[in-house]
Image: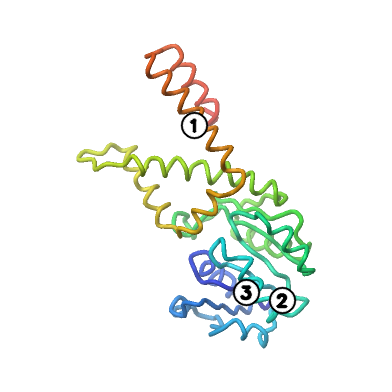
Amino acid sequence: MRIAILGAGRMGAWLTEELCWHHDVMVHDTDLLKMKYFIKVHRALSIEEFAEFEPELFINCVPLGYTLEAFDKTLPYLPKTCIISDIASVKTGFKEYYEQSGRAFVSSHPMFGPTLANIRDLHEESAIIISESSKEGAAFFRNFYAGLKIRIFEYSFEEHDKTVAYSLATPFASTMVFAACMKKQDAPGTNFKRHLSIAKGLLSEDDRLLTEIMFNPYTIRQLELINSKLAYLTHIIRQRDYEEMKKFLDSLRRNIGE
């Protein structure tokens, strides 16, 4: 299959390197240096070159927040038969955009980042394919993810964003609060060092990506839940209520399946 990829950031580069071994891939990024080390790949100096390449699948990998704008700029250079796709972490507005485009589409979300994941062994990672996607597009990504032993889930656009608010925004918010309270530790414990490593990995991500995930319409409910649990824990600590603390810890163990 001829595949055009826009954006050679971490996820775009990962997809380019994975797909080029079995497909004819062309990639473009406004930062031309990001394409410097690709092999077996056509490097497009502009999106206009997609027109001559005539891709069968277009994967939009630009930073979250610019995705729909990038579609608008690129669609004129894609054949009408080309399936268009995204890997965005938040899908707000995407359903309406795809419907008005009149094109076959597939929307998916690898629920991991090349920064923190072991990209040589992804069997414990997950990916979501949006159920409203075209059959051909969904089948392509289903086969691609399955070939890497990635666990696959199918959700609607709305279900996806609710899931992301829970599975991404909640730990992101917790890590941000940890970093906000950070101070130098001369003798950091094991748990502190683990949290610090997670925080460094998170904050190495693109600011726009982190912002858009936190601005997911469903995130605020998760933050309200975090605040309520923190208020409850604060109350227990202030009262030095050993019995209530035992109940709280037991509930936490049940939540994580212990």
Q: Foreground: 224 or 117? A: 224
Tag nearer the camera, 1 or 3: 1
- CA–CA distance between discs 1 and 2? 47 Å
Disc sitting over residue 56 in the figure: 2
Packing grade of label 1 (10 A; few <14, some 14-19, many >=20) is few
Image position of 144 with respect to 56: above or below:
above
Q: Amino acid at mark 3?
A: His
> Would you identify the image quadrant in which residue 46 lies?
bottom right
Could you say whether the residue bearing mark 2 is in a helix, strand or loop? loop
Tag nearer the camera, 1 or 2: 1
Q: Tell me which label, 3 or 2, sits earlier in the chain.
A: 3
Could you say whether the residue bearing mark 1 is in a helix, strand or loop? helix
Image x and y of residue 134, in percent: 78, 62
Q: Which residue is mark 1?
A: 227
Image x and y of residue 31, in percent: 46, 77
Could you say whether the residue bearing mark 3 is in a helix, strand or loop? loop
Q: Amino acid at mark 2?
A: Glu
Q: Amino acid at mark 1?
A: Asn
153 relative position to 121: left or right: right
Q: Which residue is mark 3?
A: 22
Q: Residue shown at 77%/65% (left/top)? A: 100
Q: Foreground: 68 or 108? A: 68
Disc sitting over residue 100 in the figure: none
Image x and y of residue 22, in percent: 62, 74
